[in-house]
Amino acid sequence: MHNDFVREDGQWPPETVPTARDWALFDRAQSKGLNLLGGNAWSPATPIVVGGAGLVLGSGCSVRGGLRTESGGRLVLGESDWMLVTPARGRTSVVPLEDSPLSTLAARTWERIAAPMGVRVTAVTSAIFSFALASRAMHDGGRLTSAVLRFRIGQFHPAVPAYQPSFGLRRMPIGRATSVNLWSSGAAVVSPAPTTPVGYFAGGAAQTITLACNQNNDIDSSLYAYVLDITDERGTGALPGNIFHSLELHFTNITDLRPE
């Protein structure tokens, strides 16, 4: 612990005789020092900031909360322990659909492709295709506020189809009972919806659909499985070939770094 010099600049000429004041200042400075060998409890009036080369803690040392460190800057956590974060943070994760588990029914009308990466519709159908979302994509303990589906129209359409692509998200108990939606109204579609063939095709470029998640959206992977449902275009004017690339998930209210 650094304290002020008893004498100015710490200069002590050879003939100096310490006075009662000197000894009193010595004792006062010593009483304010940290007993690093004997230990104790201190309440600094201001934060202690370590600069320069920093602070090195040996194996077995601990910091506030009983957190143990090891060489190399590693933190050692106990079983079912995780780090807390303050204030709450946000996070975005991206789920590539090309390697996501797809329902058996979809295998007859969809195919996986590598370029551009995704799943492509091979036959027009009114079926809903479901993708199981891996737990690593869902931030356990966080709140899912929105999801963005990336897709592209596979070919130019002479007319805009009666029903354009849409999607939704739901959760179901691990026991696979009845599921509930993560949004309160209508499946998500492109907004505003294209009204012309040129606008619908968009030059074959990637497009997005955004879903606002406003219910049942506090993530708990220990109790629920989460599912993405996609309905492709259908009805009059529908054609095959649309490609669905990925799902982007936006989380808020993350207060800890628990593993997925």
Image: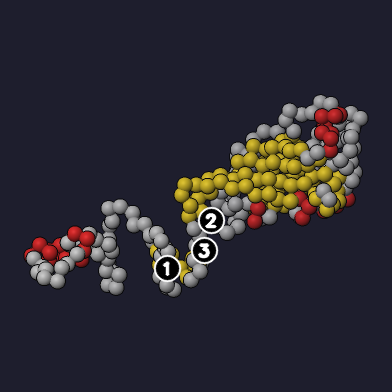
**Could you tell me how far apart the alpha carbons at marks 3 and 2 are, in whole angstroms?**
11 Å
Q: Which mark is residue 80?
A: 3
Q: Which mark is residue 257?
A: 2
Residue 70, position as x, y percentages in the image: 47, 70
Using a 10 Å C-alpha cutoff, classify the residue at mark 2 as few (fewer than 14 neighbours), some (14 to 19) or many (20 or more): some
- Rounded to the nearest angstrom, the CA distance separating label 1 from label 2 is 24 Å
Residue 243, by quadrant, is top right
Question: Horizontally, is 145 left or right of 13 in the view?
Answer: right
Of the image marks 1 and 3, the number of the one nearer the N terminus? 1
Q: Are marks 1 and 2 in contact (CB under 8 Å)?
A: no
Of the two numbered discs 1 and 2 on the same chain, state the one appearing first in sequence: 1
Give the residue type that dot 3 points to: Ser
Q: Which residue is drawn at the image coordinates 46% and 49% (left, top)?
A: 86
Quadrant where the image shows the C terminus: bottom right
Q: Position of residue 230 (x, y in %)?
A: 77, 43
Residue in view at x 46 percent, y 68 percent: 69
Image height check: is 62 above or below 84?
A: below
Residue 190: mark: none
Q: Amino acid at mark 2?
A: Leu
Left or right side of 61 for 90: right
Give the label, 1 or 3, closer to the camera: 1
How packed mark 3 is, by other alpha carbons closer than 10 Å (few <14, some 14-19, many 20 or more), is: few
